Amino acid sequence: MSTKTKIIIAIAIILLAAASRLVEHPFNFTPLAAMALFAGCYLRTRWAVILPLGAMLASDYFIGFYDWQVMASVYLSIALAFVIGWYLRKYLKWYNVALASLASSITFFIITNFAVWAFFSWYPHSWAGLVSCFTLALPFFRNTLAGDLVYSGLFFGIYNLVLLGSAKILKTQHI
């Protein structure tokens, strides 16, 4: 399969992931970090981070924008998931994809909840307030982690099955 075809397949998966944000889903069970992780792993240029961030921006346009400071923390988390994917390409095994998904989930949890604590008055700006913020966010983390693992499995799995299938077809055609 040509590099161009591989890139087209990867971009199609990312755009489908962005579109899936527009469908109703449980809180934080989204393809966001998995989409960025996948893009970081399979799109060969660092500028490719624009694709998942642009897809997020487009879907946010339809879903609705929110507090810019928290929104910036979400976009930063997605960019960091891209960076994790960038390093994942050197160690691409199923268990490393799972570990990278876990790392992306934890990164998203820490950055976004710290931003909620820092920029809103929902919690006291003290150690106890920060602990309270993170504690009350744990149910969302469960969904974030589940979504990242499921969607990463789907994106990486489907992509590799397509590559494997096309390789078998090409091998069969040479006989």
Image (cartoon, grey):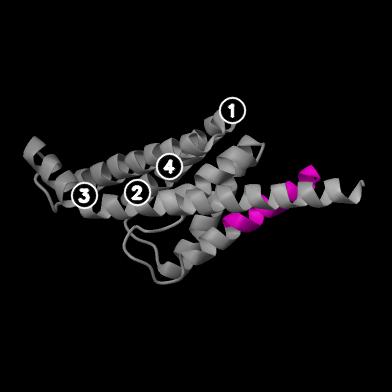
Compared with residue 1, is residue 143 higher up or lower down, i.e. above or below?
A: below
Kindly identify which residue carries mark 2. Answer: 145
> Reading the chain from its start, which is encountered first: label 4 or label 1?
1
Q: Position of residue 9 (x, y in %)?
A: 69, 53
The residue under the point 40% across, 72% down is 24
Q: Which residues are magenta?
A: 1-14
Residue 7 in sight here: no
> Reading the chain from its start, which is encountered first: label 2 or label 1?
1
Q: CA distance from mark 2 to mark 4?
A: 7 Å
Residue type (three-letter) at the residue carrying disc 3:
Leu
> Reading the chain from its start, which is encountered first: label 3 or label 1?
1
Residue type (three-letter) at the residue carrying disc 4:
Ser
Q: Is residue 118 left or right of residue 61?
A: left
Element assignment for label 1: helix
Kindly identify which residue carries mark 1. Answer: 90
The residue under the point 77% across, 46% down is 167
Kindly identify which residue carries mark 4. Answer: 101
Q: CA distance from mark 3 to mark 1?
A: 31 Å
Q: Position of residue 160 (x, y in %)?
A: 64, 47
Corner quadrant of residue 139: bottom left
